[in-house]
Structure formats: structure tokens, C-alpha cells
Amino acid sequence: MAVEKSYHMTPEEFRRHGREVVDWIADYYERVESLPVLSRVEPGAVRAALPPRPPQEGEPFAAMLRDLDEVVMPGITHWQSPNFFAFFPANTSGPAILGELLAAGLGVQGMLWATSPACTELETHVLDWLVDMLALPPAFKSSGTGGGVIQDSASSAALSALVAARERATALRSNESGCDGRLVAYVSSQTHSSVEKAVKIAGIGRANLRVVAVDERWAMRPDALAEAIARDRRDGLTPFFAAATVGTTSSNAVDPLREIGAVCRGEGVWLHVDGAMAGTAALCPEFRRLQDGLELADSYCFNPHKWMFTNFDCDCFWVADRTALVRALSILPEYLRNKATESGAVIDYRDWQVPLGRRFRALKLWFVIRHYGIAGLQHHVRRHVELAQRFAAWVERSAAFELVVAPPLNLVCFRHTAGDEFNRELLERVNRSGRLYLTHTTLDGRFVLRLCVGQTTTEERHVAEAWRVLQAEADGLERGAAPQERR
Amino acid sequence: MAVEKSYHMTPEEFRRHGREVVDWIADYYERVESLPVLSRVEPGAVRAALPPRPPQEGEPFAAMLRDLDEVVMPGITHWQSPNFFAFFPANTSGPAILGELLAAGLGVQGMLWATSPACTELETHVLDWLVDMLALPPAFKSSGTGGGVIQDSASSAALSALVAARERATALRSNESGCDGRLVAYVSSQTHSSVEKAVKIAGIGRANLRVVAVDERWAMRPDALAEAIARDRRDGLTPFFAAATVGTTSSNAVDPLREIGAVCRGEGVWLHVDGAMAGTAALCPEFRRLQDGLELADSYCFNPHKWMFTNFDCDCFWVADRTALVRALSILPEYLRNKATESGAVIDYRDWQVPLGRRFRALKLWFVIRHYGIAGLQHHVRRHVELAQRFAAWVERSAAFELVVAPPLNLVCFRHTAGDEFNRELLERVNRSGRLYLTHTTLDGRFVLRLCVGQTTTEERHVAEAWRVLQAEADGLERGAAPQERR
């Protein structure tokens, strides 16, 4: 068979094409700033440029790179642009990209310790490092009762926490007998939608999800939580899970963990804390007050793939007691049995997550932490917060715009004083300009613009330009002038 | 701020280190064949070689590559070795690795069409291509009532299918009201454990999972399924979901989809079909009989990350009717609202999966299909099947070993005639030899060795060597000789 055509890319070809791709990415980062941030293609345009049938015979690598430039790139919204201020960021960095490349090259499956011990042990080790780096509760360390694991997203972390909480609340009967319609979960009106999704997936039912009132800063009110729990207890229901947030998606509101935690502890309710973006801020001692009370949480997650230069997917999820999590998610068919697992001396991470298979995601996180060091990561968090605060100060000083809430970190919620319709149209014009990309939310029924500073290469000049474009487009809108467009 | 130290890896540094990593991977593929397949480190050995504290200041990239070699590599089980015959394969290829690299470089979030239209449209397009390539039912195409999406794993596909089925069976009430303990799901004793895990997560309860009997070839018996459904109906329960398998994990058994599908259609039960590894075989017309009846399925998945040269994660999941899936998994908070979504003209894949965020995984799949072409992919599937069949023939001709079941494709289940304990010890010796890596299962209560041919660079000589090592270790075990070890 050796003389047959192999079709495979040889190591020599891989070296050549690999360099082409590395250069393509470096070139991309050198020019991404000049590209319109939000893609302008119409629905169906990308597909229309692709051949309707797959190729019968293989094609040269150059053909793929050509189509990448000509077909794919116009359909890209540039999350890595320094002018990207939308949603929460999903930033990345050179060491993260190269860690992902190595993980793809090694191609190992980390479902069991035995299927690549380094994949499991490096993950445990780096998540222990992060407990120290972020000053998280010591119980989250693998040397204690808890431990950390990398999930794909905060959505999956929430689902895993919810199922663990469900098992704990039912004395390990919900996996066996299913849900009984009596379990009740608690969020605030500002909690990320992923918790509602998890509540549905886990068979709890949205009708058993209580939306607790927030205060004037959009933070969950512990007294309202306590009342809701008491009401449900009186109705014979079983409060079992509450999700609190450090830095909500809408406005970066911070729920008071200490007070919420006290309520949950008193009621035996599992407290899950979502610090998806803002959790990164705890790298800096001056921002750790935001997570005060976290030691009362049963589980916690934050996403290095948002604001810590580690490409998606990389959500770090900790539990204070790993027993409930592992009992909830463990399955051991014969074909996965092995001596290491049976010895009890190792972690098998497939028992800490929904899927069975898993990539070697710890590599990229390890690379990022080592490349930047704690000092480098702190530097950038502080820089982003400072830039956002500067933008907020410009808004405050402006006659035409107003702050909606004082920004705790790197997300600024603001609006033009001319009303919802004006802001809606302003957002459209700004995004159409190609010079930046913002998204919106509603707070108190009002349409609010969000500007989040968190992209890797965003500097002061990008934030200043964003402010300039916003003012110019608002002026143009007031005067009825045509919007500006880049290119 | 421009004069401050940036800590970032510059594009020029990225070019340099990127080449180093590309070369490292090419070197790895040139030497992986010579490495002991199964890692030999003891539990804790990798962690013990890592510094207890993260670095305060950044480190040079060379330090990470050094530790990759010295600390990580001894803890790697080499899934990409041509001598890897364990579990199901998780093969990869140059174009897949480079597609993953590009996805990491672009760093886009494909949760909504608008957040990178190309990410969504290329995915839809390639999954439509695959419907043709694998001769799947036309209803699975996005131009019909269905459509495809890339999930991380067959586990997540099963969970998504289960939740969609749950919503359909309860007239869209289970998301709202939670599970009621009356829904019943069906698997066979050979179905992958991920379905049981999904049943638990979704609040159905393991007690409501029926394990249907299999025939002498380990395939689900449609008559037993029909009986189980009838019994549950008599008991006032609601049969709602059945999982059938094309190529089970233990023995590659193929459930009779046409008969099972007829039962499910008649009973209004959602039929999910899992072709995780064996589904790839349908690239070749001569193997398509294995999926006969698939047009009766409501959902289907197979994993290009197993046997189609696309690195993990890449599970392709199709539904015949996307309405139930989207209704089950859709959530639309204000901060994700946008014009494209509201127009109804686009797909937002966050409504087709559990997590919100998603990588641009279609890139690597597109690269693989274009690099190999249909002809190249078919060539390798046929080659792997031929090698496995050849191995099976050697086993059959041997006096000491026996086939446990005739292998339908590329997985051979066999054992030494000397009994369970002998086989268990033989497996240990073979894996300890470093020359190959096998895993086991139990069938009919007997300990069975599994040899699966599916790694990218496995050739006849590797399979022949595996057979030689197995025979030599069996001889040594009979004679009481010490096991052989590589290195």
C-alpha cells in the first residue's frame, strides 16, 4: 500500500502551509484595525459564493487560503479588532493561539486521566494557580474538598452546577427518578440567560425559576431572595439553587455575594456565582472587593476566553465540594474502565462536565499565564478599566449623552438624551460606519448603549475615536445628514 | 500609554514562535510512531514537575516549549500514533490542524449569524455538503425542514436531541413546567453511556430509561422495543425518545434502523441515531446499507473528529425538523437582539446547542473535505476497513485467538481462548510494551479485546506489528516470561 497515493498532507507540506497560515494570522492582526468591524454581508451572500457540491478530488491548500480571503473574510465580524466594544469581549493573544495550535497538533482526548495524564494534571494545576491569582476561596483548590475544571462556556458551567445542586437537594435521587416539579431556582432579572436555559434543559421548568428583584444598581436584593425562598417553602416547594453574578451582561452589576451567600447557606440552597467577564478583574487586589463573600458559594466560574487573552473556549469552573458534581455527572461503562480510575488516585474530568470528550485546553491557558505573568495580566486589566472610566468621564461631561449607571469596571452603559428611537438609530449608524462595533441592552425599559473595553489591542486612541464617532453620528442624526461609512 | 511595556506577543514574535510550533508539530508527527503509545507516568508525576506558584513576570516562549518537551510529553498518550488502536480513534490531519489554527487566529464568536455571518453560513453549507456526501436523508438539509449544526461531541448532540424530543412530546410544556416523571426513553444495552447521562441531566431519570434487549450480534431488537413501549403505554407512561446506534462502542453493532424507525414512527417516539464513528463509512456507497432506514430518524449525528481526519471537537448533528430543536433551546435576551435575527432570514446557532458561544469549527471541516476530496476520504475509509478485516482474518486463522463477532467495519472484537484473566493480563502487557494501545469491553460477560483501525497514518505494517506483539505477549504470558517493553 505504500506506493499508493496517500492524500495526506505530509509533514513537509505541513511545515510550508503552517508557515503560510502563521503569516496570514500575523498579517491579519497587522491590518484588522483598518477593517469594518461588523460584517456587512447580506444573509445568504457567503453561501452563494460557495460551490453547491463538495469536491470529488482534493484541492491545493492555496485554493482554501484564497477562498478564506475572498469568501470568508467579508463575512467576518472582527472580534479581535481594537474597535470591537460589543457584548463582552472574547479576546485572545499570540500565546493562546499557539497553545490551541499545539493542542490540535497533539490531538489528545482528555476524557480520562489515563488517556493523557498531562492533559488532566496540567488543567488541575493551572486551575489551582488561578485560585491563588484571583484570591478565590481555598476550598476551590483540588488539594481541598473542591477543584477546578475547564468548561467550554459559562452556560455549560451553569448547567453542571445546576445538576450537581439538583442531586444534592434530592439526596441523589433526581438522576435516578427524574425531576418532580418541586425544585425551585433563583436568579435576578439581570442574570445571564444561560441559567434560564440550564433550568429548562435540566427539567426544572421555567415556572420554577424565580426572578428576584434588583436594586437601583441592578444588583440582586438579598431580602427579596430571602422572601422568595420563604414563600416557596410555605408553598411546600424545595428551593435548591441560586445564581448570583459578578458583573452582569447588561450593566456589569455586582450582586452582593456575602448577603446572598448567607441567605443560601441558611436555606441549604446551592449558590453558583457567574463572574464570566468581571471575574478576571480579581487579578488585581484593588478589584477583589467585587467578589467579597465568594467563600459562601458552592460553585463559581469565569471565562479567560472573555477578558484574559485566551481564545474561546475556556471557561474556568470551580466547586467547593467536588463530590456532588462528580456524583451528578459520573458514568462508567466497561469500555472506559481502567486501573488508574479504579485506584481513586486520579481525576477523570469526563465526570466534571456534560460531554465525554475534551481537548487539551489547559495548554493555552498555561501559555497565557506564563507569557504575561501575573504582572502583565494585571497591567492590561487596569489599562482596560482605566480606558472605560475615561470614556465614562467624557460621557458625564457631555451635554448630549448621559451615563445610565456608574461603571464598576470596563463596561460603560450610556445613552443619548434624545430618547430610545434616537439611540436605536444612532447605534445602527455607528455600527454601519465600520469604525467600531457597539451593542445595546435595555435597563428600566430604556434603550441603552454598551461600550465594553476588553480587546487585546485596544488603546486610548481607539476609545477616543469611538467617542468621536458617536458624537459625530449623533450630530449627523440630529441634522438629518447621511451616515459616514468606512470604505 | 504607547511607550509602556505592552507584554503582548507582537506579530513579528508571533511569526517566529508560530514557525517554531509548526515545526514542533511536524517533528512530532515524524517521530510519534517511535513513542510508547500509552503514557507511563504515575499519578501526580506531571504536577510534581510544575512550579507550585504561577510566575509573577512573563517568561520567554522557549521556556514553554522546553517544558512541553520535558514535563508534558511524558504524560501524553499518543492518540495520533499509528499504533493507537484503543477506544474509537480521534484522528486528525494537517488541514484540520491548520483550520483550527485559523479559527483561533480569527477568534470570532459564532453564537449569532450577525456576530460573524461566515461562521454560520459556512457551517450550514458544509453540513449540507455532508448530507450529499454521506447520502443522508434530504430532510436533513437546511433547504428542507431540517438542518445541521456542529456540536462539540455526540454526548451534547444526544442531550440536544433529547431536550427537543421532550418538548415535542409535551406539546412544548416541559421547558415551562419541568419534567413530570412520566416520560420514558429507550436505549439498548449497547447504546453509548452518553444517552444515559443525557437522560439524567434532562431530568427524565434513569428509572425512566428502558434498556432494550439485543440480538446475537448486539443489535437492538425492534420487537423488544415495541414490547417495552407497549408496556409503558399500558402503565400510563409517555414513551418519547429512542436512541439507535450505527456502530456501537463495544462491538460496532448496527441497530436495524428501518425496523426501529417504523416502531418509533408508529408510536410518535423521537428516534435519535448515533453514528459517532461508523457514520463516516457512509462516504463509501458499499457501506451505506448500515444506515438503511435513516430517513425514519428525527435526528442523527456522526463525529468527523473520530474517523474523518478532523481534530476534536467536531460532531455533526442533523435534525429532520429544526422547529422542535430551536423551540427547545432558544433564549433571546435583549442584549442579543439584532435586526438579522428578527428578520427570520438567518440561522442563529446558539439556538441549536446547549452553550451560547461557539468557535468557527466549520473552517477545519471545510479544509479537510477540500484537501482530501471525496475520493481521498473514501480511500482512507476503505483502507482502514480492509486493514481491520485483514487483522480479523489473522485472528480467525489463529488457534490461540478467536473472533467474538464478525467485524462490520474497522473495529475487531477478539480474545485469547485462555479465559478472562489471561486476556486481562495480556492487555496489560501489550499496553505496557508501548508498541500499541488497545482497550477492552465486555460482551456476554466475557472480557473482550478491541482493536480499532482508524488513525490517520496507520498502515498495514502497524496492524501486522500489533498482531505480532499480541501473539508474542500471549506466548510470553503462557510461558511465564517477563513482558517486553519499548525503551
Image (cartoon, coloured by chain):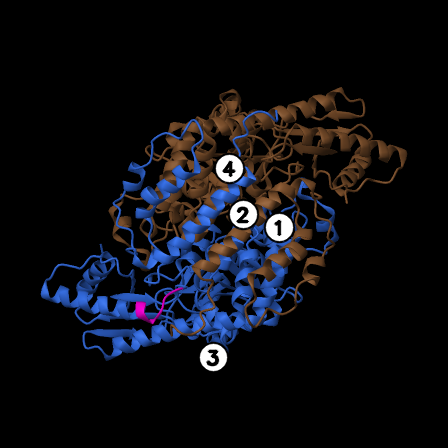
Chain colours: A brown, B blue
Mark 4 falls on what kind of element? helix
Mark 2 falls on what kind of element? helix
Mark 3 falls on what kind of element? helix
Q: Foreground residue, B149 or B217? A: B149
Q: Chain of mark 2?
A: B
Q: Which disc is residue A304 wearing?
A: 4
Q: What's under tag 3, amino acid-wise?
A: Glu
Q: Which disc is residue B286 wearing?
A: 3
Q: What's under tag 4, amino acid-wise?
A: Pro
Residue with the mark numbered 1: B330
**Mark 1 or mark 3, whichever is nearer to me:** 3
Q: Chain of mark 1?
A: B
Q: Quadrant of residue B210?
A: bottom left
Q: Is residue A185 left or right of residue A345?
A: right
Q: Foreground residue, A21 or A45? A: A21
To the question of a shared chain for discs 2 and 1, the answer is yes
> In the image, which residues are magenta?
B457-462
Measured as percent of width and height from the top left, residue B135 is found at: 55, 73
Between marks 1 and 3, how big is the CA–CA gap?
Answer: 39 Å
Q: What's under tag 1, amino acid-wise?
A: Ser
Of the numbered discs 3 and 2, the one sitting upstream in the chain is 2
Q: Chain of mark 4?
A: A
To the question of a shared chain for discs 3 and 4, the answer is no
Q: Foreground residue, B396 or B148? A: B396
Between marks 3 and 4, how big is the CA–CA gap?
Answer: 47 Å
Of the numbered discs 1 and 3, the one sitting upstream in the chain is 3
